[in-house]
Image (cartoon, grey):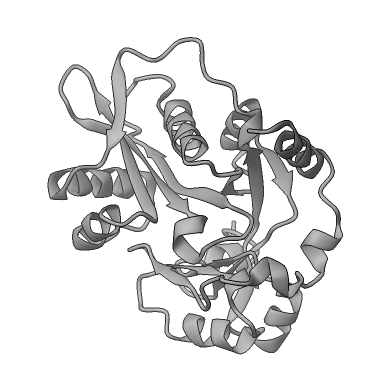
Amino acid sequence: MTQRTLVRHLKRSFSTPLSEWVEEPPPVKTRGIKRNVALPCGWGRLIFGQTFDDHDRIIDIFSSEPAGRRDLAIYIKNHHVLLAKAPDLLFVDPSHTYRLWLHHYRMPRKRPSSFRIRLLRGEEDAEQVNAIYRKCGLIESPVSTIVKNQKTHTFSYFVAEDSADGQIIGTITGIDHKEAFNDPENGASFWCLAVDPDRRARGVGRALVRCVAEHYLAKGREYLDLSVLHDNHKAIRLYRSLGFRRVPVFTVKRKNEINRIFYTGGPKP
């Protein structure tokens, strides 16, 4: 990294102009971007709002959401306008977005010895990942979708494998925005961080996040984003300890039975 590039990174990470969040980017910044991208993640589609020229197309995708799935839209310009167009269909998820500027990342001094992190290999691994999703209350993904996605350059499924018995005890999914839609901001994100609650290995979640950060740092990406529920204080403490900081990015979901608790005020006493 040249000194000029480093200075540019530092300026962006310490003081990102408000205009970058609320104004339409100039055409030169969106030239070559792939349009109308909604990635099939198994649990639902990940809709990249910045790849859409109008809100109606996003509404159409949400309207076709299959039963039992949870589509999610992020990086939407003027998300409040989108909601005003479909107030009975959509809502703003009560989650926060955190970002790690990867040039800030620092390697750990010590690696865990009770487990190792590796890439997901095939159907057997995918089935174990789904078992962890079930235990953690997450939506399962078809095994075929996980295996198919893993063969692309866009998705990177990592698992934590117990060194003693070889069982998978944690998982995380990385998504490369550059590969997904030729992201001019050169970013990445991770989703579905989950650790087997029946296992007592410490530091699995932290190690998985570090693995994804190092993976995209090696690929030359500039930042790593995540979305976390506003009241998941334990996870937020972990992310902040690794250098993630909150950014004004919001996610939008469809009003359905799975999401009902998030747009009706929570569980009733």
**Residue 159 pos. (x, y %):** 30, 36
What is the quadrant of residue 52 in the picture?
bottom right
The structure residue drawn at horizontal position 33% and vertical position 48%, both measured from the top left corner, is: 133
- The relative height of residue 10 versus residue 27 in the rendered view (above or below) is above
The structure residue drawn at horizontal position 77% and vertical position 73%, both measured from the top left corner, is: 24
Q: How many marks?
A: 0
The structure residue drawn at horizontal position 21% and vertical position 48%, both measured from the top left corner, is: 126
What is the quadrant of residue 51 in the picture?
bottom right
Q: Is residue 106 left or right of residue 162?
A: right
- The relative height of residue 97 versus residue 163 in the rendered view (above or below) is below
- The relative height of residue 6 versus residue 42 in the rendered view (above or below) is above
Q: Does the image show residue 243? A: no
Q: Is residue 71 left or right of residue 133?
A: right
What is the quadrant of residue 136 in the picture?
top left
Q: Quadrant of the N terminus?
A: top right
The structure residue drawn at horizontal position 48% and vertical position 82%, both measured from the top left corner, is: 61
Q: Nearer the viewer, residue 72 or 23?
A: 23
Q: Does the image show residue 179? A: yes
**Residue 30 pos. (x, y %):** 65, 70
